[in-house]
Each structure stands twice: as structure tokens, then as C-alpha cells.
Image: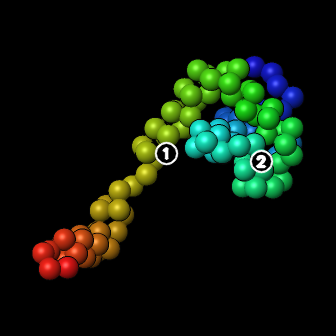
Amino acid sequence: MFSEYIEERNGGYYVAGTRISLDSVVYSFERGNSPEAIQKEYPLLRLPQIYGAIAFYLDHQEHVRSYLEAKEQEIEASSTPLAEANPELWARLQRAQQAMSKPGR
């Protein structure tokens, strides 16, 4: 897939010439943000780059959705649950949650 606005590198997709991922633009767009609102989130991007990224996403939506889902699964698989990473903190949070859910609070 070729686009003057999107480049593939290091196993990911990026707005060409930047370190801003296509993921960032797509997730913002999917939250309902306009290109102008996306530019406020990522002021290093010019509007043509944002429109180009959105057009790339819309032209390759099935492929990009598959890519994003795979990235999400990869992140979930590599994440250590807090209960395992810091059992003491997890226990404290659980006690605090139980205390907050008691009647009279």
C-alpha cells in the first residue's frame, strides 16, 4: 500500500516524515474528532497530513482495523496484570474499593 502521507516502518504505520502513528490519528478520528481537532491534539501535523491519513484509513479500512486489533492484542498479551506486578498495591486498592462500596458511604 502506497501513500504520500503514510509510511510503514518498524512494523507500524506513521504519518510520513513524523513520529506520529496512524493509530493516533485513526483513534482520534473514530472518537468523532474533526481534522482541526486532531491538529490541536497533534500540532506538529499539518491539515493535509491529517486529511491524507484519514483518507488512507478510509481507503484501507479493513486492513487498518486488522492492524489495530493485532496491536491491541499484542499490548494486552505483553501487559502484566497489576495483581501480579504489584500484589501489595493491588490488595490496598481492593480494600479501598470494598470500603467505598459499604453502605453509608
Image position of 78 with respect to 83: above or below: above
Q: Residue at point 50% right, 40% down?
A: 72
> In the figure, residue 35 lies in which quadrant?
top right
Q: Which residue is mark 1?
A: 75
User: Is residue 42 in view?
Assistant: no
Q: Residue 65 or 74: which is nearer the viewer? A: 65
Do the residues under discs 2 and 1 have CB atoms within 8 angstroms? Answer: no
Q: Amino acid at mark 2?
A: Glu
Q: CA distance from mark 2 to mark 1?
A: 29 Å
Query: Is 16 placed left or right of 70 in the picture?
Result: right
Residue 57, placed above or below residue 19: above
Tell me the residue at 58%/43% (across/down). Answer: 31
Q: Nearer the viewer, residue 9 or 100?
A: 100
Residue 93: quadrant of the picture: bottom left
Residue drawn 24% across and 71% down? 97
State left or right for residue 13 relative to residue 44. left
In the rendered view, does 93 fall on the left or right side of 30?
Answer: left
- Tell me the amino acid under the disc marked 1: Ile
Residue furthest bottom in the image:
104
Instruction: Identify the element where label 1 is drawn.
Output: helix
Task: Indicate whether 35 appears above or below 7.
Answer: below
Q: Which residue is mark 2?
A: 36
